[in-house]
Image (cartoon, rainbow, N blue to C red):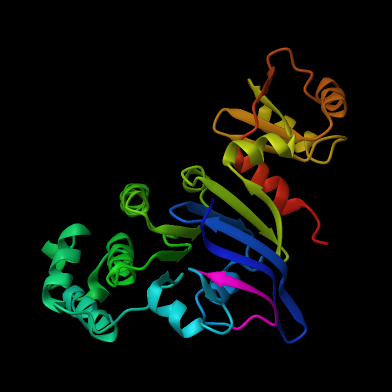
Amino acid sequence: MTRYAIDVHGLAKRFGDRQVVSGLDLRVPEGEICGFLGGNGSGKTTTIRMLCGLLTPDAGGGTCLGLDVIKQSAEIRLQVGYMTQRFSFYGELTVKENLDFVARLYQLPNRGKVVADMLERMGLADRADQFARNLSGGWKQRMALAACVLHRPKLLLLDEPTAGVDAKARREFWDLINDMAAEGMTVLVSTHYMDEAERCKRIVYLSGGRLIVQGTAEDVVRDAALVVFDLTGEGIDKVSKRLRGAPGIESATIFGRALRVVGLDRDAMRASLATIATDPGIVTEEVPARLDDVFIHLLQEPTA
Protein backbone atom coordinates (compact mmCIF):
# COMPACT_ATOMS: atom_id res chain seq x y z
CA MET A 1 0.00 0.00 0.00
CA THR A 2 1.41 3.39 -1.04
CA ARG A 3 2.04 5.84 1.78
CA TYR A 4 1.77 9.51 0.86
CA ALA A 5 3.83 12.32 2.37
CA ILE A 6 1.43 14.77 0.68
CA ASP A 7 -2.22 13.88 0.11
CA VAL A 8 -4.41 16.93 -0.47
CA HIS A 9 -7.55 17.55 -2.48
CA GLY A 10 -9.54 20.57 -3.63
CA LEU A 11 -7.05 23.11 -2.25
CA ALA A 12 -8.07 26.67 -3.05
CA LYS A 13 -6.65 30.06 -2.13
CA ARG A 14 -7.73 33.54 -3.13
CA PHE A 15 -6.06 36.88 -2.51
CA GLY A 16 -8.61 39.62 -3.00
CA ASP A 17 -10.18 39.19 -6.43
CA ARG A 18 -7.47 36.84 -7.64
CA GLN A 19 -7.94 33.08 -7.45
CA VAL A 20 -4.38 31.82 -7.06
CA VAL A 21 -5.03 28.12 -6.44
CA SER A 22 -8.24 26.43 -7.52
CA GLY A 23 -9.32 22.88 -6.69
CA LEU A 24 -5.82 21.42 -6.54
CA ASP A 25 -5.40 17.68 -5.92
CA LEU A 26 -1.88 16.46 -5.20
CA ARG A 27 -0.42 13.19 -3.96
CA VAL A 28 3.30 12.62 -3.43
CA PRO A 29 4.45 9.18 -2.20
CA GLU A 30 6.94 9.00 0.64
CA GLY A 31 10.58 9.04 -0.45
CA GLU A 32 9.84 10.51 -3.88
CA ILE A 33 11.38 13.56 -5.55
CA CYS A 34 8.49 15.38 -7.22
CA GLY A 35 9.11 18.28 -9.59
CA PHE A 36 6.67 21.19 -9.34
CA LEU A 37 6.49 23.06 -12.66
CA GLY A 38 4.52 26.01 -13.95
CA GLY A 39 4.92 29.56 -15.18
CA ASN A 40 5.25 32.59 -12.94
CA GLY A 41 1.99 33.16 -11.08
CA SER A 42 0.78 29.59 -11.60
CA GLY A 43 0.26 29.01 -7.86
CA LYS A 44 3.35 26.95 -7.00
CA THR A 45 4.59 29.08 -4.10
CA THR A 46 1.10 29.52 -2.64
CA THR A 47 0.57 25.75 -2.77
CA ILE A 48 3.88 25.08 -1.05
CA ARG A 49 3.01 27.55 1.71
CA MET A 50 -0.35 25.86 2.26
CA LEU A 51 1.35 22.46 2.47
CA CYS A 52 3.80 23.58 5.16
CA GLY A 53 1.22 25.39 7.26
CA LEU A 54 2.17 28.99 6.49
CA LEU A 55 -1.11 29.68 4.68
CA THR A 56 -4.57 28.32 5.47
CA PRO A 57 -6.53 27.06 2.43
CA ASP A 58 -9.86 28.76 1.72
CA ALA A 59 -11.26 25.39 0.67
CA GLY A 60 -10.20 21.76 0.40
CA GLY A 61 -8.01 19.85 2.78
CA GLY A 62 -5.95 16.74 3.28
CA THR A 63 -2.78 15.70 5.00
CA CYS A 64 0.91 16.46 4.96
CA LEU A 65 3.01 13.78 6.71
CA GLY A 66 -0.26 12.34 7.97
CA LEU A 67 -1.19 15.62 9.69
CA ASP A 68 -4.22 17.72 8.80
CA VAL A 69 -3.09 20.75 6.77
CA ILE A 70 -5.70 22.95 8.43
CA LYS A 71 -6.00 21.70 12.00
CA GLN A 72 -2.39 20.62 12.58
CA SER A 73 -0.39 23.24 10.68
CA ALA A 74 1.85 24.01 13.66
CA GLU A 75 2.85 20.36 13.96
CA ILE A 76 3.50 20.16 10.22
CA ARG A 77 5.91 23.10 10.39
CA LEU A 78 8.07 21.22 12.89
CA GLN A 79 8.47 18.25 10.56
CA VAL A 80 8.95 20.06 7.25
CA GLY A 81 11.95 21.85 5.77
CA TYR A 82 11.00 24.83 3.60
CA MET A 83 13.53 26.65 1.43
CA THR A 84 12.17 29.89 0.02
CA GLN A 85 12.99 31.48 -3.33
CA ARG A 86 15.03 34.22 -1.72
CA PHE A 87 17.92 33.79 0.67
CA SER A 88 16.31 34.47 4.05
CA PHE A 89 19.11 34.06 6.59
CA TYR A 90 21.26 36.58 8.44
CA GLY A 91 24.06 38.12 6.39
CA GLU A 92 25.69 39.59 9.51
CA LEU A 93 26.08 36.13 11.05
CA THR A 94 28.59 33.52 9.98
CA VAL A 95 27.50 30.27 8.36
CA LYS A 96 27.99 28.43 11.64
CA GLU A 97 26.12 31.08 13.63
CA ASN A 98 23.16 30.90 11.27
CA LEU A 99 22.96 27.13 11.65
CA ASP A 100 23.35 27.40 15.41
CA PHE A 101 20.48 29.90 15.48
CA VAL A 102 18.23 27.47 13.58
CA ALA A 103 19.27 24.64 15.92
CA ARG A 104 18.24 26.79 18.88
CA LEU A 105 14.83 27.48 17.31
CA TYR A 106 14.19 23.75 17.02
CA GLN A 107 15.66 23.15 20.48
CA LEU A 108 17.90 20.42 19.08
CA PRO A 109 19.88 18.44 21.63
CA ASN A 110 23.67 18.23 21.19
CA ARG A 111 23.45 21.44 19.18
CA GLY A 112 27.17 21.85 18.61
CA LYS A 113 27.60 18.35 17.19
CA VAL A 114 24.50 18.62 15.01
CA VAL A 115 25.77 21.86 13.47
CA ALA A 116 29.31 20.52 13.02
CA ASP A 117 28.02 17.35 11.35
CA MET A 118 25.82 19.35 8.99
CA LEU A 119 28.67 21.71 8.07
CA GLU A 120 30.75 18.68 7.17
CA ARG A 121 28.02 16.94 5.21
CA MET A 122 27.19 20.02 3.15
CA GLY A 123 30.84 20.82 2.45
CA LEU A 124 30.55 24.03 4.47
CA ALA A 125 33.17 23.31 7.15
CA ASP A 126 35.81 25.48 5.44
CA ARG A 127 33.30 28.35 5.29
CA ALA A 128 31.89 27.99 8.80
CA ASP A 129 33.34 31.33 9.97
CA GLN A 130 32.52 33.25 6.79
CA PHE A 131 29.77 35.88 6.95
CA ALA A 132 26.69 34.66 5.08
CA ARG A 133 26.49 37.93 3.13
CA ASN A 134 29.87 37.20 1.54
CA LEU A 135 28.94 33.78 0.18
CA SER A 136 28.40 33.29 -3.55
CA GLY A 137 24.92 32.37 -4.75
CA GLY A 138 25.69 28.66 -4.84
CA TRP A 139 27.13 28.59 -1.34
CA LYS A 140 24.23 30.64 0.03
CA GLN A 141 21.83 28.05 -1.35
CA ARG A 142 23.89 25.25 0.14
CA MET A 143 23.83 26.95 3.52
CA ALA A 144 20.07 27.49 3.22
CA LEU A 145 19.59 23.81 2.43
CA ALA A 146 21.70 22.86 5.46
CA ALA A 147 19.52 25.05 7.67
CA CYS A 148 16.33 23.52 6.24
CA VAL A 149 17.35 19.94 6.96
CA LEU A 150 19.15 20.54 10.26
CA HIS A 151 16.17 19.20 12.23
CA ARG A 152 15.97 16.11 9.97
CA PRO A 153 12.56 16.83 8.40
CA LYS A 154 10.58 14.06 6.73
CA LEU A 155 9.51 16.39 3.91
CA LEU A 156 11.57 19.01 2.11
CA LEU A 157 9.80 21.77 0.15
CA LEU A 158 12.11 23.68 -2.20
CA ASP A 159 10.85 26.77 -4.03
CA GLU A 160 13.10 27.37 -7.05
CA PRO A 161 16.19 26.59 -4.95
CA THR A 162 18.78 26.96 -7.73
CA ALA A 163 17.54 30.11 -9.47
CA GLY A 164 20.54 32.22 -10.46
CA VAL A 165 23.05 29.52 -9.50
CA ASP A 166 25.72 28.33 -11.96
CA ALA A 167 25.56 24.88 -13.57
CA LYS A 168 28.24 23.30 -11.37
CA ALA A 169 26.61 24.50 -8.16
CA ARG A 170 23.20 23.31 -9.40
CA ARG A 171 24.56 19.84 -10.08
CA GLU A 172 26.21 19.63 -6.66
CA PHE A 173 23.00 20.88 -5.01
CA TRP A 174 21.00 18.16 -6.75
CA ASP A 175 23.50 15.51 -5.69
CA LEU A 176 22.76 16.50 -2.09
CA ILE A 177 19.00 16.32 -2.70
CA ASN A 178 19.29 12.87 -4.26
CA ASP A 179 21.40 11.64 -1.33
CA MET A 180 18.73 12.76 1.13
CA ALA A 181 15.92 11.24 -0.92
CA ALA A 182 17.83 7.96 -0.95
CA GLU A 183 17.72 8.10 2.86
CA GLY A 184 13.91 8.34 2.81
CA MET A 185 13.23 12.08 2.70
CA THR A 186 10.37 13.21 0.44
CA VAL A 187 11.14 16.24 -1.74
CA LEU A 188 8.79 18.60 -3.58
CA VAL A 189 10.83 21.04 -5.67
CA SER A 190 9.64 23.81 -7.94
CA THR A 191 11.94 24.61 -10.84
CA HIS A 192 12.10 26.22 -14.27
CA TYR A 193 15.11 24.13 -15.30
CA MET A 194 14.12 21.17 -17.46
CA ASP A 195 17.31 19.23 -16.70
CA GLU A 196 16.31 19.42 -13.02
CA ALA A 197 12.73 18.36 -13.77
CA GLU A 198 14.06 15.32 -15.61
CA ARG A 199 15.91 14.26 -12.44
CA CYS A 200 12.59 14.01 -10.57
CA LYS A 201 10.75 10.70 -10.36
CA ARG A 202 7.52 12.50 -11.22
CA ILE A 203 6.57 15.99 -12.32
CA VAL A 204 3.43 18.03 -11.76
CA TYR A 205 2.52 21.02 -13.92
CA LEU A 206 0.34 23.88 -12.66
CA SER A 207 -1.36 26.59 -14.68
CA GLY A 208 -3.75 29.15 -13.27
CA GLY A 209 -3.66 27.39 -9.93
CA ARG A 210 -4.87 24.12 -11.43
CA LEU A 211 -3.04 20.84 -11.93
CA ILE A 212 -2.81 20.35 -15.70
CA VAL A 213 -0.57 17.31 -16.16
CA GLN A 214 1.42 14.93 -13.98
CA GLY A 215 3.50 11.79 -14.39
CA THR A 216 7.06 10.81 -15.18
CA ALA A 217 8.95 13.03 -17.62
CA GLU A 218 8.55 10.30 -20.24
CA ASP A 219 4.79 10.09 -19.61
CA VAL A 220 4.33 13.85 -19.85
CA VAL A 221 6.29 14.09 -23.11
CA ARG A 222 4.41 11.15 -24.64
CA ASP A 223 0.95 12.35 -23.60
CA ALA A 224 1.57 15.85 -24.98
CA ALA A 225 1.73 14.27 -28.47
CA LEU A 226 3.88 17.09 -29.83
CA VAL A 227 5.37 16.89 -33.32
CA VAL A 228 8.89 18.29 -33.62
CA PHE A 229 11.10 18.96 -36.65
CA ASP A 230 14.72 20.07 -36.62
CA LEU A 231 15.89 22.15 -39.58
CA THR A 232 19.58 22.66 -40.32
CA GLY A 233 21.42 24.53 -43.07
CA GLU A 234 22.13 28.07 -44.21
CA GLY A 235 19.39 30.65 -43.85
CA ILE A 236 17.43 29.04 -41.02
CA ASP A 237 17.24 32.42 -39.25
CA LYS A 238 15.15 33.79 -42.15
CA VAL A 239 13.09 30.61 -42.30
CA SER A 240 12.32 30.84 -38.59
CA LYS A 241 10.69 34.26 -39.02
CA ARG A 242 8.48 33.01 -41.86
CA LEU A 243 7.45 29.84 -40.03
CA ARG A 244 6.26 31.58 -36.88
CA GLY A 245 2.50 31.77 -37.10
CA ALA A 246 2.29 29.51 -40.17
CA PRO A 247 -0.48 26.87 -40.16
CA GLY A 248 0.32 24.06 -37.72
CA ILE A 249 3.41 25.81 -36.34
CA GLU A 250 3.23 26.55 -32.63
CA SER A 251 6.85 27.66 -32.22
CA ALA A 252 9.98 27.97 -34.34
CA THR A 253 13.09 28.57 -32.25
CA ILE A 254 16.76 28.54 -33.15
CA PHE A 255 19.11 26.51 -30.94
CA GLY A 256 22.66 26.96 -32.11
CA ARG A 257 22.81 25.72 -35.72
CA ALA A 258 19.36 24.12 -35.74
CA LEU A 259 15.83 25.47 -35.99
CA ARG A 260 13.39 23.58 -33.78
CA VAL A 261 9.79 23.63 -35.02
CA VAL A 262 6.98 22.41 -32.75
CA GLY A 263 3.28 21.81 -33.29
CA LEU A 264 0.46 19.30 -32.94
CA ASP A 265 -0.74 18.77 -36.51
CA ARG A 266 1.92 16.85 -38.46
CA ASP A 267 0.22 17.26 -41.87
CA ALA A 268 -0.26 21.01 -41.44
CA MET A 269 3.32 21.37 -40.28
CA ARG A 270 4.68 19.42 -43.24
CA ALA A 271 2.64 21.59 -45.60
CA SER A 272 4.02 24.79 -44.05
CA LEU A 273 7.57 23.45 -44.13
CA ALA A 274 7.18 22.45 -47.80
CA THR A 275 5.98 25.96 -48.65
CA ILE A 276 8.44 28.01 -46.59
CA ALA A 277 11.61 25.94 -46.05
CA THR A 278 12.20 25.47 -49.77
CA ASP A 279 15.96 26.08 -49.94
CA PRO A 280 17.61 22.80 -51.08
CA GLY A 281 20.41 23.38 -48.56
CA ILE A 282 18.00 23.06 -45.63
CA VAL A 283 17.62 19.58 -44.15
CA THR A 284 14.39 18.76 -42.30
CA GLU A 285 14.19 15.86 -39.85
CA GLU A 286 11.41 14.81 -37.49
CA VAL A 287 12.84 14.27 -34.00
CA PRO A 288 11.44 13.22 -30.58
CA ALA A 289 9.91 15.89 -28.40
CA ARG A 290 11.70 16.95 -25.21
CA LEU A 291 10.38 18.06 -21.86
CA ASP A 292 11.27 21.68 -22.58
CA ASP A 293 9.11 21.52 -25.73
CA VAL A 294 6.18 20.40 -23.60
CA PHE A 295 6.84 23.09 -21.00
CA ILE A 296 6.79 25.87 -23.61
CA HIS A 297 3.68 24.33 -25.19
CA LEU A 298 1.88 24.32 -21.84
CA LEU A 299 2.89 27.92 -21.12
CA GLN A 300 1.18 28.93 -24.37
CA GLU A 301 -2.02 27.04 -23.57
CA PRO A 302 -4.92 29.28 -22.46
CA THR A 303 -5.87 28.99 -18.80
CA ALA A 304 -9.44 27.86 -18.12
x then y, percent, for residue 245: 83, 41
Question: Residue 65, relative to residue 1: is it above or below?
Answer: below
Tell me where residue 55 sits by quadrant.
bottom right
The residue that appears at 67% across and 59% down in the rendered structure is 206
Magenta span includes 49: no
Would you say 185 lies left or right of 131 here?
right
**Whether residue 209 is visible:** no
Looking at the rendering, the stretch of residues picked out in magenta corresponds to: 56-64
Figure quadrant of the C terminus: bottom right
Question: Residue 108, relative to residue 184: is it above or below?
Answer: below
Would you say 222 lies left or right of 27 here?
right
Question: Residue 167, relative to residue 119: is it above or below?
Answer: above
Query: Please, which residue is most extreme toward the front here?
Result: 1
All told, the count of numbered labels is 0
Magenta span includes 60: yes
The residue that appears at 78% across and 52% down in the rendered structure is 301
x then y, percent, for residue 277: 77, 23
Of residue 293 and residue 108, the one placed in the foreground of this image is 108
Tell me where residue 100 sits by quadrant.
bottom left
Tell me where residue 21 sits by quadrant.
bottom right
Would you say 58 lies left or right of 196 here?
right
Q: Main secondary structure of the magenta part?
A: strand
The residue that appears at 62% across and 35% down in the rendered structure is 254
The residue that appears at 18% across and 62% down in the rendered structure is 124
x then y, percent, for residue 303: 79, 60
x then y, percent, for residue 182: 34, 49
